[in-house]
Image: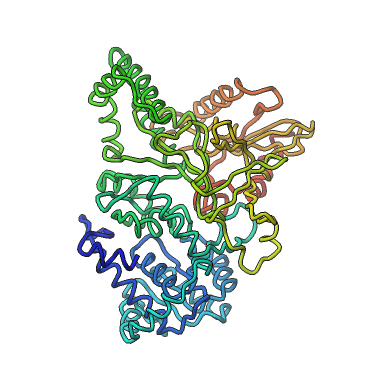
Amino acid sequence: MLRAGAERGTVAAYARRDGARWVTTSWAEYASQVRVAAKGLMALGVQPGMPVCIFGTNQPEWTIFDVAAMAVGAVPAGIYPTNTTEECVYVINHSQAPAILVQNRERLGRILAKRDEMPALRHIVLMDEDRGDAPGILTWDEFLAGGREVPDASLQARLDALGPRDGATLLYTSGTTGMPKAVLLPHEALTYMAVTLIDLIPMTPADRVISYLPLSHIAEQIPTVITPAVGGHLIYYEPDIKRLAETIKDVRPTVFFAVPRVWEKFYAGAGDVVNKVTGLKRTIVGRAFAAGRQYVDAIGRGERPGGWLRLRHRLFDRLVYSNARNKMGLDKARHLFSAAAPLSPAIIDFFAGLGMQVLNIYGQSECTGLCSFNRPGRNRIGSVGPALPGVELKIAGDGEILTRGPNNLLGYMKDPAATAAALDEEGFLHTGDIGYLDDDGFLFITDRKKDIIITAGGENVTPSLIETDLKKSPLITDAVVIGDERPYLTALISLDAEAVAQLGLDAAGVRAAVAAAVEETNRGLAPVRQVKRFTILEQPLSIERGELTPTVKVKRKAVREHFAAEIDAMYE
């Protein structure tokens, strides 16, 4: 990354919002900021192997501090902005971090309120300049000023001492049960991922990427922190996910990464527009969707679409596709990816109908974010693609997906038992996911091993397949299927308030619409796998209440506990 700064010079590395405009910073300045911040950490006494923490939303300082820590041999650990104070204290104490970068006074107040409980924490750096009357806190500028006093040769000695198997970063998993485990990744895993991904999906300084998912998660670190060193793409920082739709239209990203929840929002909005079209326009849209699917399918197989299909695609691009992409702000996007959880094949198929190829990524923190993904020329809808080059995939006897490669973790910090359970003697990571490989090496995910429901009748049920199908309804934001040791399956349903408002439905209308969605899903299922009863929750599942992870995955155990009364009522 530091070499890239010298080579790219005045080329823009990142952009941040300043009122109504975006202000860019060059690669040369970015590299200089990292060098000074690295020396700032040395001035604070941070030694190789020491963890340091970062607590805040997506801003350039987050990445600068993160890369600076790696440069001096320290191990950065992000804390999710949505973490409770208890979870923050846990991460700081578990990592024994002597220093933390905190975003603003609100988050600073939470740290200071518990400072007596964190004996290892000696230094707090504040991104904001206004520290109020809090004593012993360094502003960002004061932190950098300390770094300018450290000789460049001292930093170079740290850089020269780095080894490929040294710990590079700590990822505190946003697990769906219990306190998080600390995934320790080596430098060679990050280097492998940067080089491999840019080789498969070439990116240049002309590309634009929005950084908006939590930087504590590997899914956002890959495009924002890891791959820019090789690709050089311009990062636009969006700290407020509520402004994402506006930012997409403003930035017009050329490569866009999203979690399924974001794609589901796009799908609901575009689907609503499509469903309102009538007459001749509906006929044109129908033919456009058919041509779009054929075109994307051919591209996914690595084939050149036939002349007649290319002609129809160009025509429908002018009439339909370009308008839809333009309204979403994705008209300049060359590559579209879905990560962190499976995206419904029906939704992928819908976007294919608009000539948009959304590519599924599969992986987890333990394998540096991904071990397989669909890419242009090798895409199979419903799958999560073939393995990365140099990565092995195999299926265990019980259906669990195992993976081995240079992207695997070193282990879980301070948890040898968990490490031994995750990494077997042959070096394969046991993912905890159930799936299968087809004859062409494409991986298909069916469920989490621990999430499989065994009913009172002994039937094994994969809840995620049912839940994904239910969420095809624009009304349904989340669906959680229940049925372990129960006589039949039920579901907890949370609604999309915007969709309900747009449709103008009253309570009875909403229940009827959800019932219709459940009935539609049940049509394709065997009787023992059908949802017999459902409950509509009064409010959506929440990250703040611990029902969702920061990447919007359902925490099933928490949901079952929070809604135990509602669940029991469906079995009375």
Q: Give the vertical position of 381 relative to 126 (above or below).
A: above
Q: Nearer the viewer, residue 236 or 8?
A: 8
User: Can you say which quadrant of the picture contains the N terminus?
Assistant: bottom left
Q: Is residue 122 above or below residue 498?
A: below
Q: Quadrant of the C terminus?
A: top right
| On screen, residue 80 above or below 294 | below
Q: Is residue 139 shown left or right of residue 417?
A: left
Q: Residue at x 48, y 74 (%)?
A: 74
Residue toward you, 16 or 305 = 305
Residue at screen point 45% across, 81% down: 123
Residue 278, how many percent across, how many down?
32, 16
Q: Position of residue 239 (x, y in %)?
A: 36, 57
Determine whether, in the image, residue 460 is placed left or right of residue 522. Answer: right
What is the x, y in percent for residue 471?
A: 51, 33
Left or right, 145 with respect to 549, comes to left
Instruction: Using the rendered image of the protein, determine whether residue 16 is visible from the camera's viewpoint.
Output: no
**Residue 50 percent across, percent down from the top left:** 52, 76
